[in-house]
Amino acid sequence: MSNLIQNIIVLGICWILAIGGGIYVTFVEQPSEMERLSKAEQVANLKQAELSVLMAQMSESESLSNGVVTRWNSRYKVMPRTLSSEDVIALLNGLTEKGFNPFNLSFKEHVESSQFNKFVFSISGRGDFSAVYNLIWSLENSRALYRITDLKLNHFDLITQDPQTLRQRMDVVVNFTFDLEAFYGGVAGLSAEDEMDGAPRSAFFTSIDPTTNLPPVPEHVLPARHAKMNPFHPLIMENIQPNTLNLVDMDKATLVMVAGTDAIVEWEGKTYTLGIGDAIYLGHVISVDPRNGTMLARLNKGGIVDEVELRIKTDALYMQARGNVELTPNQ
C-alpha cells in the first residue's frame, strides 16, 4: 500500500473521530452543560431577587424603627413614682368647679404590676358640653398619664320656662359616665423624665402642665382646646335666642328712608341707621338698594336661615315716577 493511500486512511480516521467528537459534544455534552448553567442562572436570579426583597424589608424596618425611636424620644407623659388617690381627687375637684351639677366620683380599684401601677375611678355626672369637653381634654392632654375608658354621653333635656334660665343655658347640658385610670410607678424609661429631682412626682397631678424643666408641648400637635362643633346642639332649635342685645328686629321694624348705602329704619319708637354687614336681631344686613328703596337682611331663626326684605312704603304714583325715564316724540 502506497504512502498516499495510508495518509488518506489516517486523515479519514482522524476526520471521522473529529466529527464524532463534535457531534458528541454538541448533542450530548453541551445540552447538559447549558441546562446546568441555566439552572445556576435561575438560582442566582432568585437569590438576587431575595436579596432585593431583604434589602427593601431592612429599609422598611429601619424606617419603622426610626419612627418608633422618634416617637419614644418625643414622649411627653410623666408617671410619678408615688401617687395617692387624694392627688387624683384634688385634680378632678379643680377641673370641675364650674359647669357641673352633679359630679360623682367613686373609687373602683387599685392595680399593681411589674410594669406600672394605677388607680381606677368611676365618674358620672351632668354638665355643660363645653365643660365636659374641657375636662376630658385636660385629662388626656396633661403631662400626667391618664386614660379615659367607657365614655358615654347623652343629651339632657332642660325643661324650664324662665327666660333668665334659658339665657344662661345656651350651652347644651349632657349626662356623662366614664372610667378614669391614673398611672404611676412605671418601669425605668417609661416616663418622659425619670431623672427629675426636687418636687415629688405626685405633685405633677396638681395642674395641667405641672413640669418645670421639660420643654412645652407645641399646641399644634395637640387636639383643639375647644370643640369646633357641639354634636348635641340641635340644628333647628325649638326656642329662638332672646334679643338680649336689644338689636333691631326686622319683623317689627319699618324702613323710613335709604340714603346712599345706609338704611334708616324705625323700631320701637327709635330711629336706627344700618349699613351692609351691620348686626340685627338674629342676623345681619346683606344689601341696601337706594333705587328701589329696599333693605335685605339674612336671619338665622333657630337653625332656619331666612331672608327678610324691608321696603319703603310709598304710593303707586310715586313709585311710577321713580321708574326708568323714557323719551316720547313731541306732538
Image (spheres, rainbow, N blue to C red):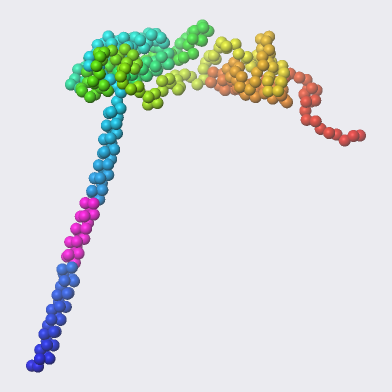
Write the residue at 37% across / 24% down.
Answer: 218
Magenta: main secondary structure: helix
Part of the protein shown in magenta: 31-48
- Depth check: give the residue in front, 59 or 119: 59
Residue 44 belongs to the span the image colors magenta = yes
Name the residue nearer the viewer: 253 or 288.
Answer: 288
Q: In which quarter of the image is residue 310?
A: top right
In the rendered image, the residue lying farthest to the right is: 331
Instruction: Residue 108: tell me if it is visible.
Output: no
- Residue 68 vs 46, above or below: the answer is above
Residue 209 visible in the current orientation = yes
Q: Where is residue 181 in the image (x, y as percent from the top left)?
A: 28, 17
Answer left or right for 95 relative to 66: right
Quarter of the figure with residue 126: top left
Q: Which residue is drawn at 80% across and 25% down?
A: 321
Question: Quadrant where the C terminus lies?
Answer: top right
Q: Give the answer, above or below, for where 2 lies relative to 265.
A: below
Q: In which quarter of the image is residue 300?
A: top right
Left or right of 231 in this view: 90 = left
Q: Where is residue 61 in the image (x, y as percent from the top left)?
A: 26, 39
Q: Is residue 28 left or right of residue 159?
A: left
Where residue 27 appears, as percent x and y from the top left, is 18, 71
The number of discs equals 0
Q: Is residue 327 above or below residue 23?
A: above
Residue 61 is covered by the magenta coloring? no
Quarter of the N terminus within the rendering: bottom left
Q: x, y percentage for residue 72? A: 27, 28
Which residue lies at the image location 23% right of the left edge and 24% below the top edge?
189
Residue sitting at x 80%, y 30% = 325
Q: Please give left or right for residue 195 compared with residue 5 in the image.
A: right
